[in-house]
Image: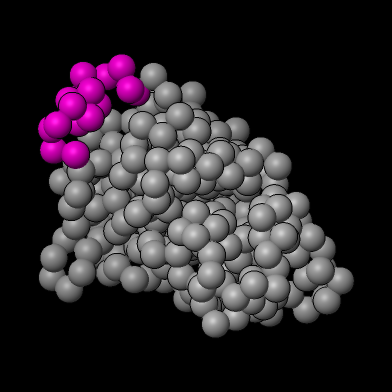
Amino acid sequence: MKKTEKGKGAQKSNMLEIKNLHSGYGKLEILKGVNIEVRKKEIVAVIGPNGAGKSTVIKSVFNIAKVINGEIIFKGKNIRGLKTHELLGVGIVYVPQGRIIFGNLTINENLKMASDFIDDPKEADKMLEIVYKQFSILKERENHLAYTLSGGERQMLALGRALMNKPELLMLDEPSLGLAPKLQRELFQNIKKLRDNAGISILIIEQNAKKAIEISDRVYLLEDGKVALHGGKNILENKKIKSVYLGGRY
């Protein structure tokens, strides 16, 4: 990392700092000294081959993976070990793989359930309005049962539920998984709009690395539980990245 990024100004602009993170499952260590930063109003992508430890980064923040060593700093405070509801309370929201929604409830009911922690009903209504403005198709189908939605629409609903929690940092685990190319393009456009319109910082774990890089400010390549490379959009020109996309380990 450049020296200019270590100063006080850079630290103040950081939303999330993961420092020397060692974590895994049981006795199996997956991450071996990972360092990642997400700055305010920034999209950061974590890419890499299967088994590199990408999802374990987010799962370490949310105590799904066991943190062995290292620090997880959010807005200057150590959040290592906080429970899920406590992380939601400080402004961190996690959207896991699989587009988890309640199929037997309407879209409107799904979204309102996600605002249960908001004490002020007017504030909850305001957030619902913001979600419907962001995802107009959800407004059009607000009284439809969620199980009737397409894969892309379900992912929009999952993102809408996350937005109802008023996140400052949104963590997405493989959001394009299982979507057709057209729906993937729409998804990545929506993710970018969340940053541009709502000012949310976003950490995205993604297999579709090319699309993730296109919308990201910075990118980390993970290999064997370590950061092998990081940089901006020009990271695609790196020989290592090119080999990954041309039938290598990715």
Does residue 44 appear anywhere in the picture? Answer: no
Give percent across and percent down for residue 58.
38, 58
Residue sitting farthest toward the right: 122
Give percent across and percent down for residue 170.
54, 54
Q: Which residue is drawn at 70% across and 42% down?
A: 197
Question: Where the C terminus falls, by quadrant?
Answer: top left
- The total number of labels drawn is 0
Give percent across and percent down for residue 45.
41, 40
Q: From the viewer's perspective, is 128 left or right of 218?
A: right
* Residue 213, quarter of the rendered image: top left
Looking at the rendering, the stretch of residues picked out in magenta corresponds to 235-250
* Residue 86, quarter of the rendered image: bottom right
Q: Is residue 66 magenta?
A: no
For this rendering, which residue is in front, 67 or 103? 103
Give percent across and percent down for residue 181.
40, 41
Q: Residue at x 18, y 27 (%)?
A: 246
Q: Residue at x 47, y 76 (%)?
A: 83
Question: Where the N terminus falls, by quadrant?
Answer: top left
> Is 12 placed above or below 98 here?
above
For this rendering, which residue is in front, 75 or 223? 223
